[in-house]
Amino acid sequence: MVKIVTDSTADVPPDLAPEVTVVPCFVEFGASSYLDGVDITREQFYARLNATSVMPKTAAPGVGVFEETYRRAAGDADELIALHAASTLSSLVHTAKLAARMVAPERIAVFDSETVSMGLGWLSIAAARAAQQGMSRENILELLDEMKTRAHIFAATDTLEFLRRSGRVGWASAMMGQVLNIKPIISLYRGVVKLIDRVRTRNRSVERLIELASGLGPLESLAVLHTTAYDAAVQLAQRLAFLAPPPIPVVEVTPVVGSHVGPNGLGLAVIVKRQT
């Protein structure tokens, strides 16, 4: 049997894939470091984010954390597939590969999802379901390789400040002077983050997200993402219900992702329906 491992940037709702093993990343506030989802909850993180001027930082777990997780997961499985956040945005894939070589390189395949949050979450869920159905590791990897070409993330943020300070996206600093007093709309596709629009109001940013999702055609999966904007996210999910089959999860994104987005963000994680 194939076991699926991901990391805490994936935002996988436990009820959708309880069999997926999650490696927690680190969130840092000043000198304090927390394991995402272990030492700090999302509620605690966002309360602190809103109450302090200290900008959080994020870090990948060390090789030893991955090694321990892989050894434990390999105990109940013949092979592992480790899906991790986009290598263009994080060192997770690199660290995971080092750990896999230390544990059992012939049994562990490390997969660069080229996405984050529920983009990675949807891939992890699909991989876990395929594994439960008895699909081979090679066939699951083929499924994931094709599926990630249909994975899109869109986000409407209040500011680019958090993304700029994270240093993960080079153009964010250059754009700061041009996006004051507007709501940036950004996309993530195949590991590349782009600023795709700039609007002036929250209502317009919501409408733009709906336009972007609708423009992709029939959807296989859809999740609504938010950072401290639950009510707005629920309303957005209701308006998008016609686009994708249920369930449409409403997910407050993990602190590791929220650190780069900031509060009051809305987003979508979309898997476009495969054309036959």
Image: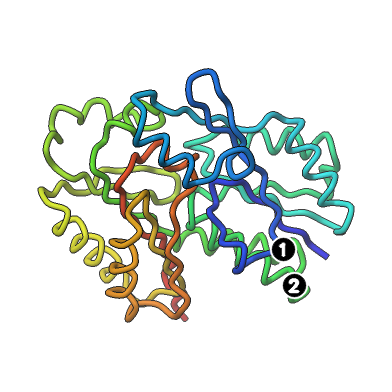
Indicate whether 126 appears above or below 88.
below
The alpha-carbon separation of the residues under discs 2 and 1 comes to: 9 Å
Q: In the image, what residue occupies the spot 15% across and 59% down?
A: 203
Instruction: Give the mark nearer the N terminus: 2 vs 1.
Output: 1
Dot 2 amino acid type: Gln
Crowding near the residue tagged with mark 1, few <14, some 14–19, many ≥20 C-alpha atoms within 10 Å: some
Residue 84 or 206: which is nearer the viewer? 206
Q: In the image, what residue occupies the spot 44% across and 28% down?
A: 56
Q: In the image, what residue occupies the spot 81% across and 51% down?
A: 73
Which image quadrant is residue 235 in?
Answer: bottom left
Indicate whether 7 appears above or below 76.
above
User: x and y percent of residue 164 in the render?
Assistant: 31, 29
The residue under label 2 is 132
The residue under label 1 is 19
**Figure coloring:** rainbow
Residue pushed farthest top? 31
Q: In the image, what residue occupies the spot 39% across and 43% down?
A: 192
Residue 126 appears left or right of 139: left
User: x and y percent of residue 246 in the render?
Assistant: 46, 79
Indicate whether 45 appears above or below 134.
above
Dot 1 amino acid type: Glu
Q: Are marks 2 and 1 in contact (CB under 8 Å)?
A: yes
Residue 266 or 75: which is nearer the viewer? 266
Residue 239 badge: none
